[in-house]
Amino acid sequence: MSLSKKLMVGLTAGGAALAPTMAHAAANLKSDDFVGISFWLISMAMMASTVFFLWETQGVTAKWKTSLVVSGLITFIAAVHYFYMRDVWVSTGETPTVYRYIDWLLTVPLQMIEFYLILRAIGAAPAGIFWRLFLGTLVMIIPGFLGEAGYIDVTVGFVIGMLGWAFILYELFAGEASKKAADQAPAAVQTAFNTMRWIVTIGWAIYPLGYVLGYFVYTTATGGATPEASQALNIVYNLADFVNKIAFGLMIWYAATSVSKED
């Protein structure tokens, strides 16, 4: 049995294990709960994307298979967390902060690793690129969680997280990763690399918008969160995950299939 087929079997088993929480969320989802509906749509989109990315590993050369598998892992991890997040929201109406940040703590570093992997596939990937992008994601995510969970001031968490994001953008646009892609990558890889870093720039800008709406805009006179805050926060975060994780993976798929046809 091929690797992709084995992974498909694993996904089927995982879906069966999640059936109870899926059924519970479905039974309690209301037609006017647009946040809950967004959780449901995105969880299905993530799972469908996982199947697509893993299946497509059969049509690319060996050096690109890892990149596509990682794309599938990103959407699969997100799908599993979305199954639980939508259940929390539908059942309680509360923001599933812990689940969301566990998801991001796994998937966002994997997205940064994708830049390293596509450069490695063309033989242009020093280890320093991997470590700088990886550490940048931790600086971006961990303070954001500490701020949203109430361990530190939300403004402090926001500012530190933005600095981590700025460091990532510097590496992708002006650092070694950018120079390697420009100097050594074929046209299809350069196109994918450029699109991926613009996703990180424009697409990731959606996340700070959700943070601002949830913790700085929709607040009471005493500084507490309003019901609109949770709705705005989750709608924006869900939209950002949909755009960034799936579109990011599609760019990997584009590079992998384009270069594989040329080999």
Image (spheres, grey):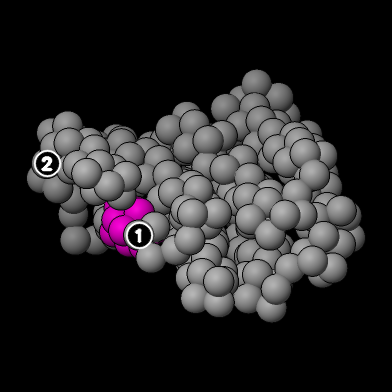
Residue 169 shows up from this direction = no
Q: Tell me if 105 is positioned left or right of 155 in this view.
A: left
Residue 163 picture location, percent across and down: 82, 44
Q: Tell me if 166 is positioned left or right of 117 in this view.
A: right
Magenta-highlighted residues: 46-56
Which residue occupies 63% across, 76% down? Answer: 188
Q: Amino acid at mark 1?
A: Gln
Residue extending furthest top? Answer: 151
Q: Amino acid at mark 2?
A: Ala
Identify the element where label 1 is drawn. Answer: helix
The residues tagged by marks 1 and 2 sit, at their Cα atoms, a distance apart of: 33 Å
Mark 1 Cα shell of 10 Å, populated few (<14), some (14-19), many (≥20): some
Residue 135 picture location, percent across and down: 75, 34
Q: Tell me if 227 is positioned left or right of 79 in this view.
A: right
Residue at label 1? Answer: 58
Identify the element where label 2 is drawn. Answer: helix
Residue 40 picture location, percent across and down: 27, 54
Disc ID at residue 23: 2
